[in-house]
Image: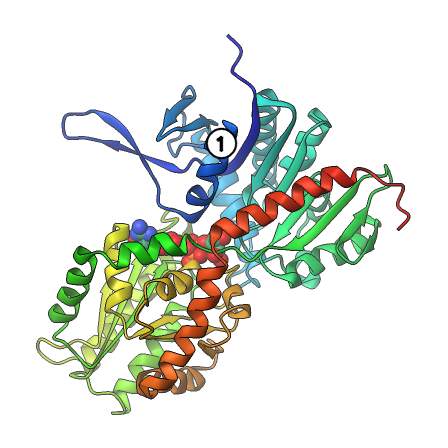
Amino acid sequence: MAPEKTDFLVIANRLPVDRRIGDDGEVSWRTSPGGLVTALEPVMKLQGGAWIGWHGAADEDLPEFEHDGLRLVPVPLTELEVEEYYEGFSNGTLWPLYHDVVVTPEYHREWWDAYVTVNRRFAEKAASLAAQGAVVWVQDYQLQLVPQMLRELRPDLLIGFFLHIPFPPTELFQQLPWRRQILEGLLGADLVGFQMPGGAQNFARLVRQRVGHRTVRDTVFLPDGRKVLARAYPISIDARGFEQLSRTPEVIARAQEIRDSLGNPRHVLIGIDRLDYTKGLPQRLRAFGELVRDGVIDVDEAVFVQVATPSRERVHQYRLLRDDINRLVGRINGDMGRIGQQPIQYLHASFPREEMAAMYRAADVMVVTPLRDGMNLVAKEYIATRWDDRGALVLSEFAGAAGELRQAFQVNPHDINGMKQALLEAMQAPPVDLRKRMRALRKQVMENDIERWATTFLAELAEARDTGPSDGDD
Ligand code: GDG
């Protein structure tokens, strides 16, 4: 029987679920926590939409299934494709290239071939499920060829694309041997969304330079009369949901417990990140370690908790980073710690959402210092949990979130002295100053939540259809 067609499709590298195998061997799925699912769930349920993505295990072809009222359609990947398309081209080529070449991107022709093959598989799956004129929303850097492939198969569809990571400056993007194919892939969409206006501008400039299409402000005019919009939609979080969670008695009690177990120091500083070289972990730990070494901070008075969630552990650069951080934490704690008192508490683990909320509540200072980040949701989550207007956020200028969170203590993460200064300021600022800043930050985050992000994107995508093709005159 042919699968049922749908009017709304989300395509992402991963399905929003993780598989659990219980002690009794029973298999169940758990929705993986993430803003995107939260934001799209109502739309998907209303429109009977479906989500297409890989389910996380190689060499396994699963039939579609339903979970929590969501229709989930798995796309299979072979072990070699996981290596070449996912770990290789997506995370060894595109990820570092799009993050300002923080580490050197690797260019391998067989990785590219796998990327093309897998993108085609996603596009074909979508083409077979979409109803006439359906809306399809493609997510992120792993699937940049899907818009064009899908348009070729199904010109009737309305296609949106959103890039969750930065779109790099033209000078860096030019390195990519397949730069033109990627640009043309994205141009298959009606609306291409970026986190920041700068990303949209970089894209438009490259389209002019490399593909030769005419662009006027946020509009690209294609020779066939079609128009493509390139705009910024800064992503956000389920702000109310996070605040509610952080107001539960369990989370409040757990936050106190965390502080108690740290010895109730005057200042608890926390960092929570995927263990990724873009997140600037060594720089911030070094800054904090130097403050302790210089005697500016007393180990009895302040502790830095760094949570590093395991990530992409089979990729070489991530293994190197893990070793580097282990060594750095060991050195700082070894040199500066006392019995029962270590300046840095380092946890290489992932935690349930409730525990995340408790950690945010326990932090006097949240330290978010990526070298480059599309947005950074951790910074926004911290703010959502500060319903008493207390706490301070130290935030890198190079996180997309810095554009909106102007009242944070902003830092250049490459400048260790500047970071030391900002950490101290955040720890020592008068409470009235902190409250004033936090109130402004909270207004920004609570008003611009993930629901607003999703509805704005989808509304502007729908307008793109209403406008229809044009002959390029405007
Ligand atoms: C990419 C872009 C952009 C982390 N550890 C745990 C956990 N998390 C959750 C956080 C947060 C999310 O993961 C991380 O989001 P970020 O935005 O901070 O960073 P990336 O993973 O790099 O995300 C980024 C984002 O896409 C969205 O467009 O902002 O720039 O790089 O929600 O809470 N959640 C749980 N346990 C953990 O241990 N439950």
Image quarter for ligand 1 equals bottom left
Residue 331 image offset from top left, x and y in percent: 25, 75
Q: Is mark 1 within 8 Å of ligand 1?
A: no
Image position of 420 with respect to 154: above or below: below
Extreme residue toward the bottom, this view: 295
Say if residue 350 shows up in the picture. Answer: no
Would you place residue 222 above or below residue 425 in this image? above
Q: How is the image coloured?
A: rainbow
Position of 278 with respect to 245 (left or right) is: right
Question: How many numbered marks have been drawn onto this rendered protein structure?
Answer: 1
Please report the residue visible at 53 percent of the width from the left and 46 percent of the height from the top: 90
- Quarter assignment of residue 288: bottom left
Residue 467 on image: x %, y %: 78, 41
Q: Is residue 75 visible?
A: yes
Write the residue at 91% across / 48% down: 473
In the rendered image, the vertical position of residue 140 relative to residue 359, given as above or below: above
In-image side of 422 versus 198 (left or right): left
Q: Which residue is mark 1?
A: 46
Q: At which x and y percent is residue 339?
A: 8, 78
Query: Considering depth in this image, is 104 or 369 the residue closer to the camera?
Result: 369
Residue visible at 69% across and 25% down?
153
In-front residue for pair 238/376: 238
Residue, far top: 1
Query: Could you say where residue 186 lies in the image, as x and y percent from the top left?
Result: 68, 43
Secondary structure found at label 1 = helix
Horizontally, residue 312 falls left or right of residue 302, namely right
Crowding around mark 1 (Cα neighbors within 10 Å: few <14, some 14 to 19, many 20+) is few
The quadrant in which residue 122 appears is top right
Give, as a three-letter code, the residue at label 1: Leu
